[in-house]
Amino acid sequence: MYKLLSVILLSLILTSCYSRMVTRVTDENLVIFPAPPDTARIQFLTSISNSIDITGQRSGFMEYILGKDEGMPIIKPYGLSIHKGKIYISDTMLGGLVIIDLKKHTFSYFEPGGRGQLKKPINCFVDDRGYLFVADAERKEVVVFDNNLKYVRSLGNAKTGKPTDVFVAGDKIWICDINAHKVLVYSRDNYELVNSFPDVDPQHENFLSSPTNLFVTGDKVYVSDFGSFKIKVYTTSGTYLRSIGSYGKALGQFVRPKGIAVDRNDNLYVVDAGFENVQIFNKDDKLLMFFGGNYEGRGNMWLPAKVILDYDNLQYFQKYVHKDFKLKHLIFVTNQYGPDKLNVYGFIELKSKK
Amino acid sequence: MPVYLTYFSVLVLLLPGLNRPLLAQNFKGSMHDFQAMGNKLFESDKPCLVCHPPHRSSSAEETLPIWSSKAVKDTFTVYGSAGPAEQPGLPLGSSKLCLSCHDGTLALDSWGGRVNTVPFLNAGFEDRKNGLKNDHPISVKYTSTNAMRTGELNDPFISNSGLGNTIETDMLTNGTLQCSSCHDVHNGMGAGKLLVKTNKNSNLCLTCHKK
């Protein structure tokens, strides 16, 4: 009994002895896009690169007793997913996932063994039930875990395929396969393959040369084709509709398109690892703006890979928002290199003056 | 072949870089000749464009971002590196170019973030199973001073690279070691694994490292 009490007490002391630093946002350190005098649309909020960014530094006293906490790094992130206050980051160099609990302020590595073992997790997706899907390019399968992170099963043909991304929408699991040059569609209920597209014909414009990332909305499937330097759009049944972008360095073009996401206004966000930025297009495929840029400091990017949007976890990042702005949604961007591994931006609106 | 030669003559004038022979016949059919790979990985009828984007494509219409009142610039900088330059381990310039493709999706992602922590002399490079986790450090300064300090490296300004000139001229970019110190993307030497020279008997390693 006493033992239990002291354990509880000790853990209380330990958790309360971490101090978390929040840099106050001032007019001087504010990072916004596009630059003034244009109306600010996006504010850089914060970055997460190490467990200390989440758990906080040990207090002076605890540091004296336990030594300085060096923390655990995010090593080389590619994809990520966010669900109910938890951020899941697939780290290709770790060969596992980093799981950050924003509510409990915890940071941990998920390195499952046995049948769930991961080798090179490129992307991951957590569905509305909390099931975790991981696209592993070296294992060449999508590995499924339940909401307690227990291994469920794997999907895909490791002999012919190489999944690079996975998305769950409706009752389907959508997998982007770079070796098969296809999007594979599985049923979420029985894990049967129900559809795959496009047909393999390199001559046709619906062909996917090197598809690396995908995003599914209510009625469309967006595929980032690294090899044709375009974002290709299909209906959910696989009919090719159109493409966005072309190869080159001009605004609105791409050289190394990677992660993509679509917001609630049908605006498309595209990461380019060559320009080291994200471009945003409206539903008529017209360029609205871009943000990021070659790394010089906070808010810039270093070989970025993924972009994810989130409308449900704003509460954890309100403290970084400038007082004149209203936060509409969050934008997460991973950087494979550099000092800032996960950049968090906010899509903002100027508060109306009373 | 004639197609390749035209691109060579155009690009030679445009690109600063390491002074190396560009032998078209070696590039052809190499792992970086994506056209020879049946155009399946990359949709490009021009074998060189994949890594050398045209300065400004004429087909691109003038696009002014709708949310910008005036054009900030008309092209993006590719693999620009300003900021905290030359931090050991953080890839710059042409190494960024390599790593933008070698990210684990379509091409092997070699060389990871665990910089300078894993000594590997004999282990690292053959370790394909571990995705080359123990790769060589890059973006490190290689000067006469640090050669002297460790005493384990040859002086880059004096030692012959075996490629025609000194290590400094033939293998370093702004005095730093990058992917291109050991690799020639164009396979100019035809030495296998796109290396600048074969690594038989640790030949490549011993160019810079003393026994």
Image (spheres, coloured by chain):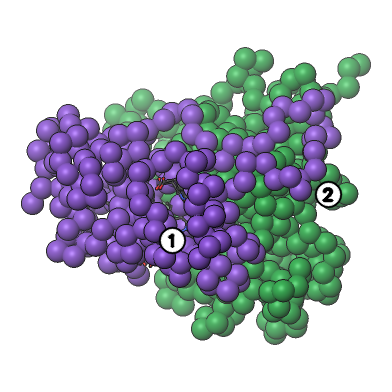
Chain colours: A green, B purple
Q: Residue at x 40, y 54 (%)?
A: B22
> Where does residue B95 sit, x and y in percent of width and height?
42, 46
Q: Quadrant of residue A152?
A: bottom right
Q: Residue at x 39, y 64 (%)?
A: B26
Measure the alpha-carbon separation of dots 2 and 1. Answer: 39 Å
Which of A111 and A308 lies nearest the eye of the viewer? Answer: A308
> Where does residue A58 sit, x and y in percent of width and height?
40, 32
Residue A91 visible in this rendered orientation of the protein: no
Q: Quadrant of residue B140?
A: top left
| As drawn, A108 above or below A122 | above
Q: Is residue A217 left or right of residue A100?
A: right
> Where does residue A61 sit, x and y in percent of width and height?
34, 27
For numbered disc 1, what is the local secondary structure?
helix
| As drawn, A245 above or below A45 | below
- Amino acid type of the residue that numbered disc 1 sits on in the rendered structure: Ala
Q: Which residue is mark 2?
A: A285
> Where does residue B166 sit, x and y in percent of width and height?
21, 40
Which of B176 and B134 lies nearest the eye of the viewer? Answer: B176
Q: Residue at x 26, y 58 (%)?
A: B197
Q: Residue at x 64, y 31 (%)?
A: A44
User: Label 2 neighbourhood size at 10 Å, few (<14), some (14-19), many (20+)?
Assistant: some
Q: Which residue is mark 1?
A: B24
For numbered disc 2, what is the local secondary structure?
loop
Circles 2 and 1: CB atoms closer than 8 Å: no
Choose mark 2 or mark 1, whichever is in front: 1
Picture quarter with the C terminus of chain A: top right
Residue A323 visible in this rendered orientation of the protein: yes
Chain at tag 2: A
Chain at tag 1: B
